[in-house]
Image (cartoon, grey):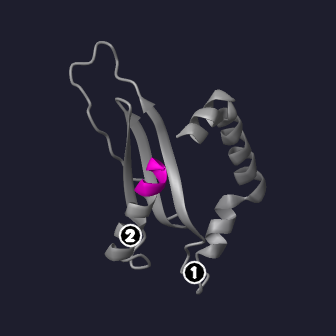
Amino acid sequence: SSQLAAFEANGFGPQSVRVFDWAVASMEMTRLVELEADNPYTLGRAYCCGVSNAGVFEPRADAVATVEEMYYATSTRHAGATFQASCVTVDGALDVCLNAATPVATAESAARFADAFVAEVRA
């Protein structure tokens, strides 16, 4: 968490997003994922985990209902990842929905990955 605080304090977040956007565009990431889909060695899963971050949920001041937790899933169909972590921060807590590409990932491997993911986030 101290590394993340330093990262944010130095303003690296917006720059990282810009670099990622540039890299995806210049590498033609969508085309690479399409090509990898036919790879018999990876079964179309070119990398371990994709992460989608919706950011911080800020409720409207005039909201009638309250939101304590929020979960959403991002498809792995066109992402090329074995696991997909969809993240959003609500009321200071990080909510993560992890989904896996089956049958490539079994329920047991997804559970192990989820445990390791949580341990890494908490470290």
Q: CA distance from mark 2 to mark 1?
A: 20 Å
Residue 65 is left or right of residue 23, and the answer is left
Which residue is denoted by mark 1 in the rendering? 42
Q: Say if residue 104 shows up in the picture.
A: yes
Is 36 colored magenta in this rendering?
Answer: no
Give the residue type at disc 1.
Answer: Thr
- Residue found at the far right of this picture: 26
Residue 98: assigned label: none
Q: Main secondary structure of the magenta part?
A: helix
Q: Position of residue 120 (x, y in %)?
A: 48, 55
Left or right of 47? Residue 117 is left
On whether residue 120 falls in the magenta region, the answer is yes
Q: Residue furthest bottom?
A: 40
Residue under the image location 69 percent in, 47 percent down: 20
Depth check, front residue: 67 or 109: 109
Magenta-colored span: 118-123
Residue 74 percent location from the top left of the image: 43, 54
The answer to which of 89 and 6 lies nearer the viewer is 6
The one of 38 and 112 positioned closer to us in this rendering: 112
Residue bearing mark 2: 112
